[in-house]
Amino acid sequence: MSAVLELRDLTRVHGDGESAVHALRGLSLTVSAGELVAVMGPSGSGKSTLLTLAGGLDSPTSGTVTIEGTELGGLSRKAAAALRRRSVGYVFQDFNLIPALTAAENVALPRELDGDGVRTARALGLGALPEVGIPERADRFPHDMSGGQQPREASARAIVGHRRLVLADEPTGALDSETGEQVLRLLRARCDAGAAGVLVTHEARHAAWADRVVFLRDGLAVDETGPLPDAESLLHASER
Amino acid sequence: MSIRQGLLALLEQGPMYGYQLRVEFESRTGATWPLNVGQVYTTLGRLERDGMVEPAGADDEGHAVYRITDLGRAEVATWFRTPVSRSAPPRDELSIKLAMAVTVPGVDVRAVVQGQRTATVRALQDYTRLKARATQGTAPADLAWLLVLDSLVFAAEAEVRWLDHCEARLSRAAQDPARVDVPSTTVPTTETAR
Amino acid sequence: MRLTRGWRPALRIARREALRARGRSILVLVMIGLPVLGIVALDTLVRTVSVSTVEGLDRTIGGSDALVTYDGSTTAVDQTPDLSSRSGSAQDADPLPTPTVDTVRSVLGRRTHLAELLTGQLAVRTDLGLARPEAVGVDLRDPAAAGLFDLHAGRLPRREGEVVVSERLASRGFPVGSTMTLEAGPRLAVVGIVESTTTRGLSQLVGPVGPAIRAALGDPEVLERAWLVSRPGGVSWSEVRELNTHGMYALSRAVVADPPPASEVTAQDYSGSRVGSDQLAIIGLVVAMALLEVVLLAGPAFAVGARRQQRALALMAAGGAEPPHLRRVVLASGLVLGAAATTLGAVAGVGVAWLARPVVQGVSDTVLGPFEVSLRDTVVVAAAGLVSALLAALFPAVLAARSDVVAVLSGRRGETRPARWSPAIGALLLAAGVAGSAYGALRPGGGEVTIALAAILAVLGTVLVTPLVLGTLGRLAGRLPLPARFAVRDAARHRSRTAPAVAAVAATVAGVVALGIGGTSDAAQNRALYTPTAPMGAGLVQVFSQTPPDWTAVERVVRQQLPGARTMPVRGVQEGGTASYQVDLPVTTADDNFGWASNLGSSLLVGPAALRVLGLTGAELARARDALAHGDVVVFQPGEVTATTANLTVLSYPADGGEATEEGRWQLPATLVSVPGSSQPARAVLPASVARDHALPVRQTALVVTGTSISTTAEDAIDEAVGGLDESASLYVERGFQDDGTRVVLLVLAAIGAVLVLGGTLTATFLALSDARPDFATMGAVGAEPRTRRLVAASYAAVIGLVGAALGAAVGFVPGIAVTYPLTATSWAGPDATTSKGLPLPDHFLDVPWLLVGGLVLLLPLLTAVVVGLGSRSRLPMVSRLS
């Protein structure tokens, strides 16, 4: 499988001198197409930093970030933004829906930023909303939507178009477990359809949706868990 | 003992014979707790002895069919009403293992914890994969399967969280030995600087 | 105390919030503090510039106890204690004898010290000819005269024949050490340079009263005389009244210091400019508009503050706070910031005024009085500032107290719906404004105040309608490109923040458009009715004094500056004095109160030379020439009047103001001519023979300069030089209709409008940008290019500016057009008046300053948008959550 996201020896220091905070200290991680990697760790372990670096929102102090063969370090801010629009989808903890845009417009925002016309983008948004189960809400504004619809809309925005990399930062946030699960199912389905995904979470239950789980502790990946070859064997192990 | 009440609950829906009961039980709990037919017949025998089921003849193929009695129905009702008791926690191997590891010198407790967490997370992933594969139907049988999976998921998650907590506690203890609550024979150290 | 107990927590929260949200606090401080600063500084400067009787006493009466003056009255007189108003008495008994030193002493006692004070014009010989500076005869070494003049160089005159001169006169060839020769022959030595403590820049000479100066100033025709009186104990009010019975006035230090009760004062005080109800209404309107602007400009900052505090307020409400408590928290921020802003503004205003004194003195001829800060005015202005801050905070406070606690706590913070009644009331006010404007326009005679009042109603209506307009625009924004759509929808969503800013822009633009239309229409009328004084490009030396200037000297000055110029004396019948000369027609004219402007020193001119500067052209000029050649009197008379004769009457007025007696009356052949316009340049032109035959006193009254173009430099030089010859002489150069006044007014309007529009736009834009931070972060995360933020910023500025300006222009046109009806009404001009081109007058003029309107409505918002776009940070913020 081809690597969609490749992080190599990433360090990121916030601030300097006495107050310097080492968010990451030489982290490496590769995420392939079709793979969902969960990043776990306590608060302050650098989970969100990893995600902002992976999305090109922030630059590492050292190390490289490569998305589909393009090294972000060599890109201008403009080119990095274009890459985000076309290749990267973001799901935020607070969903970050823009209150001044309707559901369809929020979903189609990356396409519209990429230059699609108002109508084309709207059509795209309308196409993506049924996928997340809220077709009839296309022209509502976020504040008119229920707590369960907002995260689904936010997910739709992350997967609209043909994004190859989906980055999710605590996408289940403060959701109840049922709604949270719906978001994770969407994410899982996206990865099963060929995208690469990174899921930042501090809940093992959510991390378990991933193919791999990476534990961050003090800026390093300290533990990694791959899948067991046969799921059934674990179940039947308890028979003994 | 839940097998006894589980079989009674199945019989409440109608008379059944032994193998039939086993199949129903496993399908509803997702084969998580497999039963052998011997266990089923032993249990049925005890239930009959206690007057909660009674033989109801044989079906066309000659299987001995059992039927629930009024006493049995009362027992099922009581079972559903009564919460599962946590007053006597089941013996937990993991807790005992960690308790031992902490007190026995020369054991790398963190390695024990991390190893266990890896295993538990893998289990968690597997349960989740099963969940992802499970049909999202609303039929009672589908729901029953999902509920059991959820129970396993939450239990495993609880274990992971407990392990996280253990690790955090251990690393804090390592940083500040004076605060460890473990009995110690060493003289209080003057070393306080980090 | 209950009051403070209820407010104390609110004030504490407000204070901390003000310190926390620095940017917003500074915004409010500027919006409220700057106007306070400006008004306090202006008030202080005006009070400093204006010199009251008390402040100026030393300048007027020097070191004496009183200044006693006599102006030639033959009857008893009356005065106010501070001599601000004076009047002769009506009943004429026997004429009083002219008072002398003895008359004064008879009232004030023998021991009274009297210093004579003579003022008048002296003729002095200069290189160019005779100059006529102002002369003051007083012994400056007398302590009574101390304070009238400041010695700048040299020394004071010690004896007769010595004088001191002002800087201006010294610079005209009489430095210290030089000698000046009077027309009559005596020579005076210049020993020093002094400056009047009252007025700067005059051409003056001061010396003790000796034979030379008395001879020059003591013309029997000049009846005015004055004494500086010094007497132990001063001069009392009853003594002043007694001097009045002798026909004299007195300004007494003791009386000014301790004025008599009003019951003892009989004279009416006309000096205090009585504020009419119209003026009061205008002042009220200006104050109301200023308050409204400040409230609207500061409002958005409070709205944002209230919304940022929304969660805290909801938590307070959940914890048992009642709506009044919540209102108080927001109002308290108005109180805290308003108090800080007005205090800083007032203190800074006084400081600015102090620093500005030298600048003001530089442009003012009057010597400034003592630095004067009016505590009352300052407190009133500061209170107004505080009130505006509270008003600005009031609306957000009411909204905050009304907001839905559950919605806020659950994060579904929507804007509170605007009350349904406010747009309705707004529409009513708008309608009332339009109706009022129409009424004011059609009402005969002075509807300006009505229209101004209607304009305020319309502006208030606009303020109330603005949220509705924004909401509607928000719903229509669906097809706009992303940045514009975001800006419009965000503006509509955050109405409490945007609407005041848009309304501020609208109010400003409405005011500027209305005043601009009024101003340019007025100018259009003036242009249409402009009557040139001289032929285009020609110069005219005019003199307005009784004693004729040295015309040869004037001519020499002109030739010196303009070697190629042709000069042509204009001669006329000398007016003034006790004789009056009238020319009228034997027929009754339709409109007899037709005016004529006498720019040529006389309304009855003599000789054909005058015809060339009276605006006559073509056939009319030829006709007038023929008439004069035939000995006809040329009479200026417009309209359908025919007459072939005119009457010349000579009247004589007795010096003591009795009935006029007719000295002579002749019927003369006449020709009627007229020039287009609303007034005629003179009454008549007489043939020289007529003047001679009837022994009319003819002299040169003006000098026309033609034959070369006169540059403004030459104009200034000649004007200065002829001014040195005679204070009242000046050069006028005809350059056609000069519209500098209107241009300045439009410029000032444009500047004020631009500042306010910019203020409103920038405030709301930057508040919006800081509010939209999370949205920018989201856009950045999903791949917006950095310029997106700039585009949104520019769109925001454009939305606020354009919507506000469009609303304002629409509202401003109504009173603007309406006010042209009363303002440029032409009914006064008479039915025969025409424009200066000879066209019939329209009943009113309308000229829209399209450049100003277009600049303010389109150009400025777009320019602001571009500047905001270029000036705002292009870097998108990071998603704020960083665990």
Image (cartoon, coloured by chain):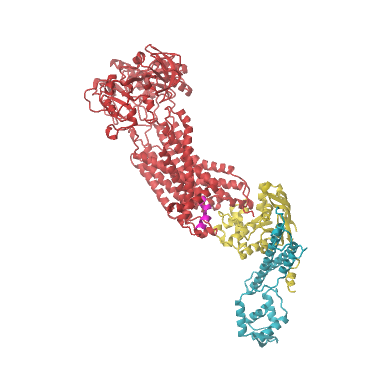
Chain colours: A yellow, B cyan, C red
Question: Residue visible at 74% across and 69% down?
Answer: A234
Looking at the picture, how far across and down is residue C730, in whole percent?
41, 22
- For the stretch drawn in magenta, the main secondary structure is helix
Residue lying furthest bottom? B57
Residue B113 vs residue C424, the one in the foreground? B113
Relative to C175, is A166 on the left or the right?
A: right
- Please tell me whether residue C437 is drawn above or below residue C247 in the rendered image: below
Q: Is residue C379 above or below residue C607?
A: below
User: In the image, which residues are magenta?
Assistant: C305-316
Residue B168 in sight in this render: yes
In the rendered image, residue C541, in percent from the top left (x then y), is placed at 40, 21
Q: Relative to residue A87, is residue C603 depicted above or below?
A: above
Res C593 → quadrant: top left
- Seen as rendered, the residue at the extreme front is B187
Query: Does residue C165 appear to the left or right of C638 in the view shown?
Result: right
Image coordinates of residue C397 in percent, x first then y, are: 47, 52
